[in-house]
Amino acid sequence: TYNRLWEARQIWGAIVNTSRAWGMMAKDCIISPNATSDAKVIHRQLIYRHVAWLTALRFQLRETRLWENINKSYNREYQQFYTIPEKEQKLDEELKKYLSDEELTYVLSKKNRATHIVSLQSKQLRELKQLGYIDPLNYVELENLLVNFYEQQGKCERIKNFPYPRQFASINLFFVRLFVFMVPFGMLKEFEKLGDHMVWLTIPFSVLVSWVFSSMEKVGESTANPFEGGSNDVPITSMSRTIEIDLREMLDETDLPPAIQAVNNILM
């Protein structure tokens, strides 16, 4: 299960790097053929639409699946220490900040919103190429970046939509429970060697050892779903905000949203 968490971190690391490349190329490789200022409007459209893609993607990844653990009693109890932004915000209100009314209506009519936002990016790039705003080589490179975003999105969806194989999860659980059951019998003779009264130490030490292994099993179960909104998940909300700040600074904007701060040492 740790491999799924590690892979999720690698995916979002790639999204961060590729997003910065997108911002750089969208700004430097799209030039108005008539030397007018409308290129700046296009730069803003492409960068804002990319932030919309990040927004739609993180909302999709925070959706609850039946096999996830976020609704288990111990996780619900722990959520008093932090909040999940995607559970408190509305997707349409967030996308409204980055998309035109026409695009917003189109995107919200689709099931996989993130996919169709990238499709809108590709559509505009094709139109810009036909109008002479992009030379063929840069057009190909920008399209390759969009393909890369699709690939990273697909990897996230694979982790999100396919549960960790139950045969592995069940075997781990059975082995831990068997171990917990047998621990007292293994310790009994060892404490008996220390004296008759020392036998009673079997109880607290058995509880301690059992708690350690049970906790490890629960940690493994939690890391199998790195996007559900748990306290140890990949902080996709914070990473999306960091990308947004970086890209909007490329547009020389100064009215930027603040970086996401950790709450009780938990970063979403």
Image (spheres, rainbow, N blue to C red):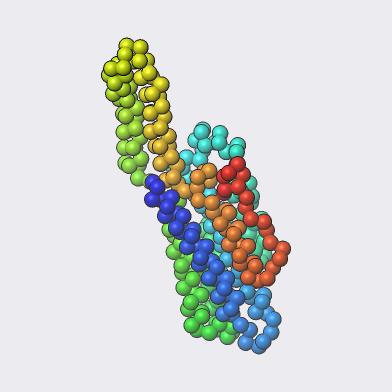
Rendering coords of residue 142 (x, y %):
51, 75
Rendering coords of residue 102 (x, y %):
65, 66
Determine if residue 122 is in view: yes
Whether 170 is drawn above or below 51: the answer is above
Where on the picture, by quarter, is residue 117? bottom right
Whether 257 is drawn above or below 232: the answer is below
Whether 212 is drawn above or below 261: the answer is above
Q: Residue furthest top?
A: 196
Determine if residue 66 is in view: no
Report the front residue among 48 and 207: 207
Q: Residue furthest bottom?
A: 34
Where on the picture, by quarter, is residue 20? bottom right
Where on the picture, by quarter, is residue 43? bottom right
Whether 7 is drawn above or below 75: the answer is below
Give the residue drawn at x 57%, y 45%. 266
Number of marks:
0
Report the front residue among 171 and 189: 189
Q: Residue furthest front?
A: 194
Rendering coords of residue 27 (x, y %):
60, 76
Give the residue drawn at x 59%, y 49%. 86
Report the front residue among 206 and 71: 206
In the image, taking residue 90 as reference, residue 66 lies left or right, namely left
Give the residue drawn at x 46%, y 67%. 148
Rendering coords of residue 111 (x, y %):
53, 57
